[in-house]
Amino acid sequence: MKSDLPAVELVVRTIAETAVANETYFCQLDSVVGDGDFGYSLARGFEKVLENFDGFDRSTPGAFLKKVGLTIASRVGGTSGPIWGTAFLRAGSAAGAKTELSGADVVAMLRAAVEGIQARGGASLGDKTLLDALVPAIDRLEADLAAGGSEALANAAQVAERAAAETTGMLAKRGRAAYTGERSIGSPDPGAVAIGVIASRVSAAWREYCSTKEQ
């Protein structure tokens, strides 16, 4: 039976490695109006994902994602653990028992992740959070996949990076930055920037993966 698990593994590993590699950068961003520990928390959680990577349930892509989510939720401190862990758990639940994932399935998984983030953190679009980069990227991905575009992931990554930069002019309404009021205006949201950086790296890794498969 064909399975899309290798592709899911690639995406998760890329996300984890990117989070670890950008620990200092993400902390610097968070130190402007936050606690400065966002990068540290994210890196520690994804380090655990990489450490336990080979032992995760691989019966289906959904089962694999759920194990990743549980690891993050239990290992990442602060608000990042529950939010990022819930995102992976909801994505895994949306995948269900499927072994093959269509573009529509992937979009549904990402939408489920967004719903989980909103339920866990109480944030909405415009609150200056990672959602302000993630949701526009998903919207673009869905539109491009529906149109049969070959650069859907690359385009979504560009949207995520642009949307993350646009959070600079926003007033933070959630998280530690919200307590700083108008001081939060003038710097980008660290979570949104992380989404942009991760999306860009995933896009590059995916392009390389597809190129290798075609050879």
Image (cartoon, grey):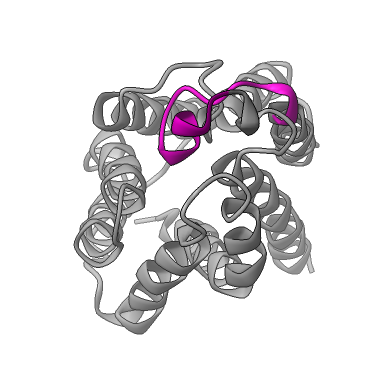
Foreground residue among 176 and 132: 176
Q: Quadrant of the C terminus?
A: bottom right
Where is residue 97? Give x, y as percent: 22, 43
- Residue 199 position (above or below residue 132): below
- In percent of the image, x 68 and y 28: which residue is there? 185
Locate residue 23 relative to residue 8 in the image: left or right: right
- Residue 205 position (above or below residue 131): below
Where is residue 7? Give x, y as percent: 52, 58
Q: Which residues are magenta?
A: 168-181
Foreground residue among 103 and 21: 21
Locate residue 55 relative to residue 183 in the image: left or right: left
- In percent of the image, x 36 and y 50: which residue is there? 80
Locate residue 10 relative to residue 4 in the image: left or right: right
Locate residue 67 relative to residue 175 in the image: left or right: left
- In percent of the image, x 25 and y 32: which residue is there? 120
- Residue 95 position (above or below residue 209): above
Where is residue 58? Give x, y as percent: 27, 65
Q: Quadrant of residue 73?
A: bottom left
Q: How many marks?
A: 0
Residue 42, magenta (yes or no): no
Q: Quadrant of the N terminus?
A: bottom left
Residue 179, magenta (yes or no): yes
Q: Quadrant of residue 42?
A: bottom left
Foreground residue among 113 and 8: 113
Q: Quadrant of residue 161?
A: top right
- In percent of the image, x 72 and y 28: which residue is there? 163
